[in-house]
């Protein structure tokens, strides 16, 4: 199979035809690129799992182009759900609802809930609208690999596996959506992302984090399996002193390490090889996957500085710790 890469205008037209014919297409969103197919067609859903090499017990997120598309897919919809939709859709938030009967069990891995997202990306929404069906889509990478934030990244993993990649440029956010489970007494974050607990609590009063913390307002796919991993070993350094020590130990063993740091740490790293992830939290979030993919091509070990536990960087660290297998130096 020849995998084409087309710009958004031509890609949307051909992509919609391929989806309607039961094929799988990679498309851009503001978070990462998705590997999409007709969410209501079990045979198409099976092609998504096969192309990605994804375990069949790992559910998929259903992507929509407009709010009204939610209602046929869910069995329940409350007033608090409406407030979240009004505030964060379109955007990098997936809401988990009790599913309706039209959603195939293969999409939800047999679960009685379905994750639904409306991307902020205009290209993504135009593509979904042109398809005329909700689109089930995980990230468009081979299972366990670093998620793709460019069409080139998708091509590296999916060339020959799918017919088309729609090129929408670099992803704006850079990590997967926040996944919020709405089926319990307190809404629970199953996967952190750019929509933070504090932002959600501001709308619904209280949310529970994936670690069990309850965040109150003032007076997820990615949970079960190894994810986001580069092809070379990766560790997290708790501080710059640990990063420098681990780097020097690796060099002494004739290894070829590379450091991932933030802007303010440039002086502390000295003449050691490094990549600057950015100065702001948004830059770090946008760059992390791209830098991990680029780094694995030029080194044999990655050392990432701990990026912090506040705001969106807490979500980025969720991905980095999964990529490193939780190894901290």
Image (tube, rainbow, N blue to C red):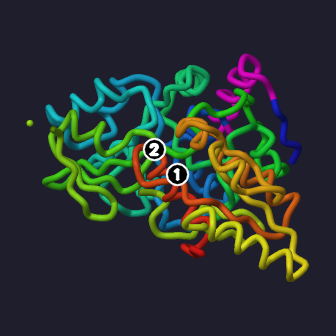
Q: Quadrant of residue 28?
A: top right
Instruction: Give residue 229's quadrant in the image.
Output: bottom right
Q: Which mark is residue 312?
A: 2
Furthest-left residue in view?
A: 219
Q: Position of residue 64 (x, y in %)?
A: 45, 31
Q: Is residue 35 visible?
A: no
Residue 83: in magenta span: no
Residue that badge 1 annotates: 316
Q: Is residue 160 left or right of residue 171?
A: right
Which quadrant is home to the C terminus? bottom right
Residue 82 against residue 75 in the figure, above or below: above
Q: Nearer the viewer, residue 280 or 13?
A: 280
Q: Is residue 109 left or right of residue 169?
A: left
Q: Nearer the viewer, residue 129 or 115?
A: 115
**Is label 1 in a helix, a strand or a loop?**
helix
The disc at residue 278 is none
State the image quarter where residue 34 is shown.
Answer: top right
Residue at 71 percent of width and 74 percent of height: 246
The answer to whether residue 200 shows anywhere in this view is yes
Left or right position of 257 against 145 = right
- Magenta segment, which residues? 6-26
At a point 82% along the width and 33% down the height, the residue shown is 5
Percent position of residue 301, x then y: 78, 69
Describe the element under mark 2 as helix, strand or loop.
helix
Residue 196 image offset from top left, x and y in percent: 36, 42
Task: Between residue 54 and residue 182, name the one nearer to us.
Answer: 182
Look at the image and say whether residue 20 sits in the magenta stretch.
Answer: yes
Residue drawn at x 30%, y 26% as measured from the top left? 87
Distance from disc 1 to disc 2, alpha carbons, whole Å, reads 6 Å
Q: Residue at x 56, y 49 (%)?
A: 138
Q: Are marks 1 and 2 in contact (CB under 8 Å)?
A: yes
């Amino acid at each position: 199979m020849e995998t084409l890469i087309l710009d958004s205008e031509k890609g949307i037209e051909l992509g919609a035809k391929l989806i309607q014919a039961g094929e799988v297409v990679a498309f851009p969103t503001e978070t990462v690129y998705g590997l999409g197919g007709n969410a209501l067609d079990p045979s198409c859903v099976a092609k998504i799992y096969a192309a990605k090499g994804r375990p069949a017990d790992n559910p998929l997120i259903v992507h929509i182009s407009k709010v009204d598309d939610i209602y046929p897919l869910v069995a329940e919809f409350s007033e608090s759900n409406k407030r979240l939709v009004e505030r964060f859709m379109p955007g990098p938030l997936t809401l988990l609802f009790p599913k309706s009967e039209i959603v195939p069990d293969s999409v939800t891995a047999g679960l009685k809930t379905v994750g639904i997202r409306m991307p902020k990306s205009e290209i993504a929404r135009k593509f979904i609208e042109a398809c005329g069906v909700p689109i089930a889509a995980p990230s468009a990478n081979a299972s366990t690999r670093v998620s793709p934030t460019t069409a080139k990244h998708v091509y590296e993993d999916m060339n020959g596996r799918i017919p088309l990649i729609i090129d929408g440029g670099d992803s704006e956010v850079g990590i997967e959506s926040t996944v919020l489970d709405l089926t319990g007494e307190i809404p629970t974050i199953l996967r952190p992302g750019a929509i933070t607990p504090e932002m959600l609590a501001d709308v619904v009063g209280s949310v529970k984090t994936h670690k069990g913390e309850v965040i109150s307002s003032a007076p997820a796919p990615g949970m079960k399996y190894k994810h986001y991993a580069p092809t070379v070993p990766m560790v997290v350094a708790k501080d710059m002193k640990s990063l420098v020590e681990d780097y020097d130990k690796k060099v002494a063993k004739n290894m070829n390490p590379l450091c991932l740091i933030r802007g303010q740490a440039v002086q502390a790293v000295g003449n050691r090889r490094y990549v600057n992830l950015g100065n702001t939290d948004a830059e770090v979030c946008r760059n992390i996957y791209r830098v991990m993919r680029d780094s694995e091509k030029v080194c044999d070990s990655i050392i990432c500085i701990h990026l912090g536990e506040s705001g969106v960087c807490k979500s980025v660290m969720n991905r980095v710790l999964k990529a490193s297998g939780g190894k901290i130096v």
